[in-house]
Image (spheres, coloured by chain):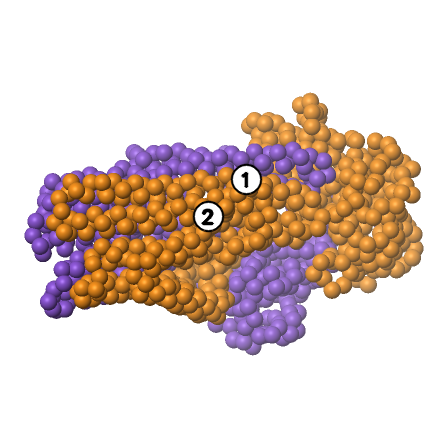
Amino acid sequence: MLDPRIFKFPGAKRALGLLCILTFIQAIAIIGQGRALSIALTKVWEHKQLQSVVIIILVFISAYVLRQLLGVLKEYVLAPFADKTTGMLQSELTKQYANLGPSAISQLGTGKSVTLAVEGIDQVHDYFTLVLVKLFDMMIIPWIILAYVFTIDWKQAIFLFFIYPVIVLFMIILGYAAQAKADREYETFNRLSNHFVDSLRGLTTLKQVGLSKKYADNIYDVSEDHRKATISTLKIAILSTFALDFFTTLSIAIVALFLGLGLMNGTMPLLPALTILVLAPEYFEPIRNFANDYHATLNGKNAFADIMTVLDTKTVADSDIYHREQQRWQADDTLEINNLNYQYPNANNNTLQDINVSFKGHQRVAIVGTSGSGKSTLLNLLGGFLIGKGNIKINHQTLPHLQQKDWQSQLQVLPQKPYIFHDTLRNNLAFYAKNKTDEALIHAIQVVGLNDWYASLEDGLDTIIGEGAVQASGGQTQRIGLARILLDQERRVLLLDEPTAHLDIETEIKLKETMLPLFDGRLVIFATHRLHWLAQMDLILVMRDGKIVEQGTLSELNDKQGYFVALQSAMRGSKK
Amino acid sequence: MNKLITLIKKDTWVFPYLKSYKKLLVLILFLGFMTIFCGAALMFTSGFLISRSAQIPENILMVYVPIVLTRAFGIGRPSFRYVERLVSHDWVLRIVSKFRKRLYQLVEVGTKSVYAKSQTGEVLGVLDNDLFKIENFYLRTLFPTAIGLFVYVLITIGIGVFDWGFALAVFLMLGMITILTPIITIVVNGARDYKQQQLEGQLYTDLTDSVMGLQDWILSGRTSELFERQQNDFNAINKIKAKQNHFNWWRDMFGAVIIGATAIILLIFATNHFGSDSFGVNWIAAFVLAIFPVQDALTAISTGIGEWPRYKNSIQRLNQMDDKAQTELQENVTQEKVAITHPEIKFNQVNFGYNDATVLENLNLTIKDGQKLAILGQSGAGKTTFLKLLLGDEQPNKGTVTINNYDVKTLQEERSSIIAVLDQQPYLFASSVANNLRLGNLDATNEELWQALQQVSLADLVKSLPEGLDTPMTEMGNRFSGGEKQRFALARVLLQNTPIVILDEPTVALDPITELNVLNTIFEVLADRTIIWVTHHLTGIELVDQLIFIEDKKISMQGTPQQLMVTELRFKKLLELDHGDLTDK
């Protein structure tokens, strides 16, 4: 129930210690409240005047208010601790995301990363406040009440004591039964509950096959199946709550009954009997509260564990070994890769095997190969987003990997789909080069051929673009990516990952005209499917199944009549 | 407040459904009430029972009725609660089934047969989530409020039977938690909730930017800026949440204190009323103890109402869906019942535009039976519009689109037997392989399915699957690669067996070699059909016998690929580039 890692956070021991003390005082207040009320009731039952019970009622009121006040106080004790800790976890988490880098995050799932930092943290916050309070209530209050009842009537106390584990046991058994049933039906259940969104997403297809109108009834039927399945699972799932409710109320009824019998025998006066009757619900209240929030407990615990797992993931060390001598990548700088291997965490085979290649100065290098041949993985390793095993040298300085701050600060990347931030066009363009004048930005817009689009924007450079705002088409997105590159003349190593894969041929040709001048004075490493780029390249790396099988200039490779030639004709579709 | 009233008045999604399954609804309210009643009655009878017993009656039969009642209420409370939860979920899920059908129909009206890029899954996810919110609105706000208020009124009447003065006192006292605090909650938290939702939206956008654009943040060396921004977002939200919490804590404490005060009023009332005679005193404990179990039912009103701002947006969004769908409803056109096997498609002086912007102008084109036509053009040139006109999803502003001289708008009911579509994102449902294929032809036999699979070279793959044709496609068809998905979709098209097949950039997401393989298969198996193929580059262009370029609202080039190679220098150049002009460097 309690994750021991909680105690490691600063302020945890103090907060939990205070919580303990407050809960203890609260338990005393509950007893005082019950006792005072019983005394008052007994007195009026004995035909005493209302005036004679004024003082004891005041005691009741004080105890009652104190009890409620302590409830609020407990929240005030835990809240600062929970706020501080979750705040810390939240910022640690974003920092960790940055340390792990884009490849690791995409393996975790971008959606999950975002949810974990928002909803996950919320659940942990609930766990630290709500659940801890209930947990401590359950660990302290019933036992103090029980001890007090024991001093009044030990037989009742023993009954209450033994019924407690029985209730817990029933809950556990029923909980398991519900879990088993839920597990059995999980797949059907999942399928049924996803069916609706699945159908909405496939609507275009349904329209095409002319079934979309008829399908509405199917939606209803499946939803009804889902309802029946839900209810049948629910019948068992809420049985544990029922059992808890049933046993506690029944226990109270039994206590009342025994007390009644004791009273009739004359073995017990009214006051102790009434006290026990008033305290019995208080005895069961904490476990009921806890059980009602059991899901919150589980969610909070799991979210907490998930977050800790991400935080405990090892990040790369030695990212500050490489120090470049000049500001820019120079014409005589070299990057050498020897015997580089890479294996994805869950894969059986190496995705990259024995990569040997060297890049020099402002070379233009193309990487070609079929899908899955390892082009993107190689680019990710060169960008320092993945860490492989092998020898890497920049200008004869040996490096453990390329996740080097000074290396990455020379890089520019143009992916298949550059990410457009939900921000102004200005901030999107000047992402790598802040403090550019508007003239410089508009000049860049003209150079990359975005004039017409720019003219159509209402707020000019201040227009908000990106998801949920003004959208850019595929070609426009690439042009924004190019403008980013153009605006930052300090960076001189350019990695391109099939930047034109989604564009139509004419747009690509136009874009090519803009791109080629950018290649001058830069080391360019370009993964592509499109053959026409190869004529402008100094070196071509041909990849197959994670290996570089051929490398050389275009004419060298053509003369070789090897895999490259076969690949070319397969891509071109010419008959062999 | 006025906004709230107009929202409720105009609402067609939440409140009108309270009229359906009325009996169940009454049952829910009854069961909910009984749960609370039994809880209170249990303490009431227990209080009476032990008070009476303490007077040591001569015979156990004197307290027999309270003994039985104590047991009955003890069992009754959890049982009623159990059934109430089941019935209320059942009712809500019944409504959800209706909701889903309705929402589906609304979305269906606005959906075209041509894949739209803007229609993302997220939008649909939001709608589904909205339904979930309404589910909660019924369960967490509407039912508890109704039951709580009913209990409130009943308590007042119950005491009013004995003494209207005390009834008024209790009415006013409890009114503070049933009426006053819910209103204060809405007023105080409403504005905060709105602010919180805005901040949460901001947080999500920023966080998505951080995660999706992580590579750019790292490379630009601006991560510290990112952390700072994120921290500011978190702090702003946490601050507002803390305020909400503080309010809620004090509100709940206030509720508890009111119950305590009511208990004292009841003590005075019961003593005044019953304290004088020796039997009557037994009611005092009964009345006082009975009020405490009612607390939860009454404070649930504030909690439920306090959640209203969370549901409001969802309810508004769904209501707006109605308005949108209404404007999109198409006119009714008398439909022709014809079987078309040898189609001839004619675009006759077609003009089309959205609002002021003309997309196509004076377009004339005849596509003969069995022709293989490729349509080229830059994105935004009007290729998709051309398809929409052909499918009858859009009507030309001027001119006609006909198949065998029937206007396509009169062929809508027959359309799926005339035209099949293979697009860039064919959707594979999270159902079995066989079900997905049968969407093309509901009556297809297993042999026909296998035959289609054989034609698209998937038979071996499907045979190797653990359950063959009954293997579930995992959600979105993630089990299969891009090329395989296209082949499945192609098999579906084959089973649909239409004389015309539209190919809408079906290979855009594939690498060139897979692309060529898929295209070769497509043209091979559809050899006897009319094919209209929209493409954005020239891979496989030799497979067609007619080619048009759409440019500047018109057809700018037309002819066979072989002709155009000779007559159009531009086409020749594009072709060379696309095929990799590697010889003359």
Residue occupying the far bottom of the picture: B447
Identify the element where label 1 is drawn.
helix
Which chain's colour is orange?
A
Q: Going 83% across and 31% down the picture, which residue do you hit?
A: A327
Q: Label 1 is placed on what type of residue?
A: Lys
Q: Quadrant of the C terminus of chain A?
A: bottom right
Nearer to us: label 1 or label 2: 2
Q: Going 39% across and 46% down the picture, which residue do you hit?
A: A25
Q: Eyeballing the image, is B478 above or below A329?
A: below
Image x and y of residue B258, in percent: 26, 41
Mark 1 Cα within 10 Å, few/some/many (few <14, many 20+)?
some
Which chain contains the residue that carries disc 1? A
In this view of the protein, which residue sits in the foreground, B409 or A466?
A: A466
Which chain contains the residue that carries disc 2? A
Tell me: B164 left or right of A462: left
Q: Is residue A282 visible?
A: yes
Q: Going 14% across and 55% down the picture, which residue do you hit?
A: B282
Q: Going 81% across and 50% down the picture, which residue do you hit?
A: A367
* Quadrant in the rendering for residue A269: bottom left
Image colour for chain B is purple
Identify the element where label 2 is drawn.
helix
Q: Earlier in the sequence, mark 1 or mark 2?
A: 2
Image x and y of residue B176, in percent: 25, 39
Measured Cα–Cα span from mark 1 to mark 2 = 20 Å
Q: Residue tagged by mark 2?
A: A20
In this view of the protein, which residue sits in the foreground, B471 or A243?
A: A243
Q: Residue tagged by mark 1?
A: A84
In this view of the protein, which residue sits in the foreground, A152 or B124?
A: A152
Q: Label 2 is placed on what type of residue?
A: Cys
Image x and y of residue B473, in percent: 56, 65
